[in-house]
Amino acid sequence: MQLLEAKLHKIDRHNYRSYSSLRGEYQFVDFDFYIDSTQADPFAPASRVRARRKWSLTDLEWLKEQSVDYQRAARDFIARQFADLAQQINEIQIDRPGQAVLDRTAVVFDDDAIELRFRINLPADGRTIIAKKTANLLTFTMPKIIRRATIARELPLDEMKRHCETIEDQVALRRQLKDKGLMAFVADESILPRLAGNSDLPMADAVPFVSPESLAVELEAPHKGTVRGMGVPVGITMIVGGGFHGKSTLLNAIENSVYDHIPGDGREYIVSDDTASKIRAEDGRCVHNVDLTPYISNLPMGKDTSAFSTQNASGSTSQASWLQESIESGSKALLIDEDTSASNFMIRDERMQALIAKNDEPITPLVDRISLLRDQLDISVLLVMGGSGDYLDVADTVIQMHNYEAVDVTAKAREVVATHPTRRQLEGSEEIKRPRTRKVNRSALQTMLEDGKFRIQVKSKSSLRFGREFIDLQALEQVADASQLNAVGWLWFQLAQSKGWEKNPSKAFAQMLHDEWFRMMPNYGDLAKPRVIEVMAVLNRMRAAEFK
């Protein structure tokens, strides 16, 4: 600390760039402090720093004996405490978690210490260094926050234990889905609606969820005990009902429950198959060498759809591509909302079949392929549908949402099918194959690393900059946090450097995303573990990417 103070005194009133002389390691009384990078000017991204505090000084050593998921939740909790303590200090920022509990690098545990990784805006008067203010920040204010966030007596331990146990419960519930023949589970008393379209907080006074008796199942959680709720079976499940009755709200809760949520979120006992992929139409996106023949063939001008590529996909081709890409990436469950789907990809009704001959229609709609996905590829589909009853012919389970209450109307749906049989003709073949595994061309990624302009930059969940390209990700509804996109960029960096991994990128990314995935990353505090599904979904939207 004294060395740091001496360096600051030496550069007092110097140009802001002189802060670069502070980079290095400093030993404080009860923690080690690292300044890894300094900002070039007051308006640049804040300086990256780390603080390591030995376990013996925290009275939290018992955390090292807990499960991986308990430790993940504890690190998340400490990051939240640090963020709360620093919220009045504009110069100090940590990657603040949201409603989901992700595997983040803001707080890292190792055998020796708890490590905090955060950013500091180094003070200045214009572009002139103010050493006294900086010294007060680094040697008085910052140490107080570090100590209070990493010592047992300053932490609300009962709250932390509840936080961690809730996460362990969700992990345990999710692990039971396969044995129970479920793709998702929605606990009774869950709060599904969110506060607003731009808020992930639970809505006050929302109707708590109650399972229909016929779909009710009980799962066991290690801390909460028996949890009762609605099991969504594997296979084809439809969510139906009138407008504004909660169909999409139920789907949104399920799609976001591939991740764990904090106590009080309302979704902390909703769990989904962690490979579930929400797909939709996405006009204008790029597509790279995807086999669309199960859904689209015989395009005008003889365009090949077995290795389809475009920089400007239509709604139907984009949704078909997303479906194939999701399966290629390992998804075992597809989530679809008709409101965000291409209608001609979803259905071609009897009258349209009569008007336009099949030879003139290149699209085979999903309604004619969905049962093959279930029966031949073991892919489940959860579908929100309010406008077409033709899917009732293939649905295994039908759930009606009425005033935010779930009703099992499967038996009634079968009566409707028997009473009002469809006369539309089945289209397409009786066989479907898994999409082939594409290889990624590493040279395209390497070009972006070697042109002198390499950069990974994320400002929100809707965009990633990799090198010179800005990738539009507004359609990816299952990205929980912008920090996941930072990690995506660095995973690509690893792929570009490692020969052989490009042969099966999904498998390569799965190997990279092991329990200590962040060890291959830089010592940044704004990284969060993504799913392979999202890593590949972002790569598929990179216009400069090349797949073979």
Image (cartoon, rainbow, N blue to C red):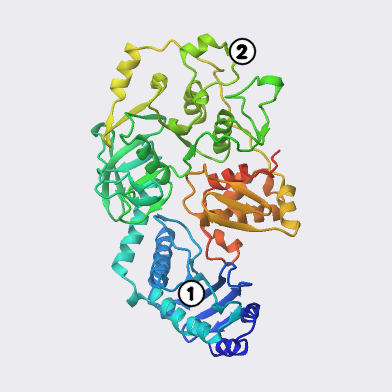
Any part of residue 425 in sight: no
Relative side of 258 to 457, left or right: left
Q: Nearer the viewer, residue 54 or 453?
A: 453
In x, y percent, where is residue 340?
47, 34
Q: Could you say whether the residue bearing mark 2 is in a helix, strand or loop?
A: helix
In x, y percent, where is residue 405?
26, 36
Quadrant of residue 210 in the image? top left
Relative side of 240 to 26, left or right: left
319 to 367, vertically: above or below: below
Quadrant of residue 540 in the image? top right
Q: Which mark is residue 113?
A: 1
Distance, label 1 to label 2, CA atoms, is 67 Å
Question: What is the crowding at mark 1: few (fewer than 14 residues within 10 Å), some, or many (at least 20)?
Answer: some
According to the picture, the residue beneath numbered tag 2 turns out to be: 359
Any part of residue 419 in sight: yes
In x, y percent, where is residue 250?
35, 39
